[in-house]
Image (spheres, grey):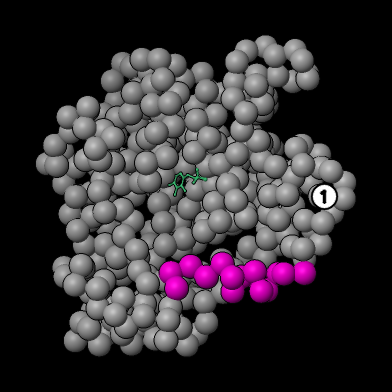
Amino acid sequence: MKIQFVDLNAQYNEIREEVTEAIQNVIKDSAFIGGKYLKQFESNYAEYIGTKHCIGVGNGTDALHIALKALGIEQGDEVITVANSFIATSEAVTNAGAVVKFVDCLYDTYNIDIERIKNAITGKTRAIIPVHLYGQPVDMDPLLELAKKHDLRVVEDCAQAHGARYKGKNVGTFGDCACFSFFPGKNLGAYGDAGAVLTNDDKIAKMARMYANHGRFEKYNQEFEGVNSRLDGIQAAILNVKLKHLERWTERRREIARRYDEGLSNVVVAPKVLPDVRHVYHLYIIRINSRDEVKEKLAAAGVATGIHYPIPLPSLKAYSYLGHKENEYPIAHSLSREILSLPIHGSMKDDEVSYVIEKINGILT
Ligand SMILES: *Cc1c(COP(=O)(O)O)cnc(C)c1O
C-alpha cells in the first residue's frame, strides 16, 4: 500500500462536478477580481466562523501582515508569538516593521506557554499572535486576560484551525482579528494561494480591506500605500464549494484521530487535547524517541510522514541575526527531535488508517 500524507486528488474526486461548474461560472461572469463569488464566500465564511467581517486576501502570510498593519503595528513595536510555528507567523511581524519576540511552547499541547508570555512582555510590546497549532486551540481565556491587562492586541493565527472550537466558540472569534490560510493542503484549501482576515471590528475591517487593496476604497483615490493581496474570484468560488463539505471532512479527521489514539496508545505519545475544545487535526502528531528511524521505516513501508517543524523558528538561519540560543527554547527543541506527523485528511479511507496503525505497531514492538 502507498499512503500519501495528503491526498488532494481523492478529495477532488468527491466534488469534481461542483468545482467545475463553480469555476465555469466565474469565467462566464468574468468575476475574476472582486465580484459576487468573492462576496458570497466572504459572507459565508464570516457566518461559518461567527465574525462580522471576512476580508479575502492573497494568502495566509499576507493575512497576518495585513492584520498587523490594520491594527497599527509599526516600526519598533514588539509582537510576541510562539517558537514552534511555520515561518509565516514571524515573517509577517518583521515585514510589518515590528520586532518578533519568541516564546517557548508547552510540552503536552505543543501550543504557546502563556506563563512564559508574561516574561516576554516589555514596554514596547503591542500584540500577541497565538497560533492554534495543528488544529488545537490555544487556551484563550488566560491569554486574553493577560492581553487585556497589558493592553495588547491579539491576532489569532488560525491557518491550521478552520472550525476548531474553544469553549463552544470557533477560533477566529477571540482576538482583535484572526488570520486564515486556504493553502491547498490546509483543512479548507483553495486550488492555489488564498487567505482571509476576520474581525468583528468595523474599523479594523475597513483598514484591512483598504491595506490589502492599495490603500483605497474608491478606485483612484488611494488614501495610503498598501499592498495588492486579494482573494481572486476563482479561488473564492472553489472555497464556496468546499466550505459546504468542511464539517464532514473535519468530522472524518476527528474520527481518524480517534482511531490513531486507540491503535497507537501503547507505542507512542498521542496528542493531548484540552478539555472543552474541538481539535480539528490539521496534523496528527505523535512523539517518539527514535523519530528519524521510525520515519525511514514508515517511508520504506509506503507511509508518507512529515515533521512540523524540524527547526524551531528562533534557530532558523533567517533569525540568526537575533542571536537566539537553543537553551532559550528547550521545549520547542526537544519536540523538534521527537515529533512525527502522520497522514490525516478528510478523504482518507479506513483501510489506509489501519495500515498506518499496523506498520507503526510493527516497527515499535
Ligand atoms: C500555512 C500557515 C501560514 C501561512 O499561510 P499561507 O497561506 O501559506 O501563506 C501561517 N501560519 C501557519 C501556522 C501556517 O500553518
Identify which residue is drawn at 65% across, 35% down: 230
- Which part of the image, by quadrant, shows the C terminus? bottom left
Identify which residue is drawn at 37% across, 72% down: 304
Q: Position of residue 280 (x, y in %)?
A: 49, 61
Residue 72 at least partly seen: yes
Q: Is residue 177 magenta?
A: no
Instruction: Magenta stretch: give its range.
Output: 4-17
Identify which residue is drawn at 31% across, 53% down: 309
Give the left or right position of residue 263, taking residue 287 as reference: right
Q: Tag count in the figure?
A: 1
Determine the secondary structure under disc 1: helix
Identify which residue is drawn at 27% across, 58% down: 108
Badge 1 amino acid: Ile
Give the left or right position of residue 163, taking residue 105 as reference: right
Predominant secondary structure, magenta span: helix
- Which part of the image, by quadrant, shows the N terminus? bottom left
Question: Disc 1 designates what residue?
Answer: 27
Nearer the observer, 201 or 310: 310
Q: Position of residue 8 (x, y in %)?
A: 56, 67
Quadrant of the rendered image containing residue 115 = top left
Q: Indicate whether 361 appears above or below 29.
A: below
The crowd level at tag 1 (other Cα within 10 Å; few <14, some 14-19, many 20+) is few
Q: Position of residue 70 (x, y in %)?
A: 56, 23
Q: Indicate whether 273 appears above or below 294.
A: above
Quadrant of the rendered image containing residue 151 = top left
Q: Indicate whether 174 appears above or below 97.
A: below
Q: Position of residue 15 (x, y in %)?
A: 71, 69
Give the left or right position of residue 156, taking residue 221 as reference: left
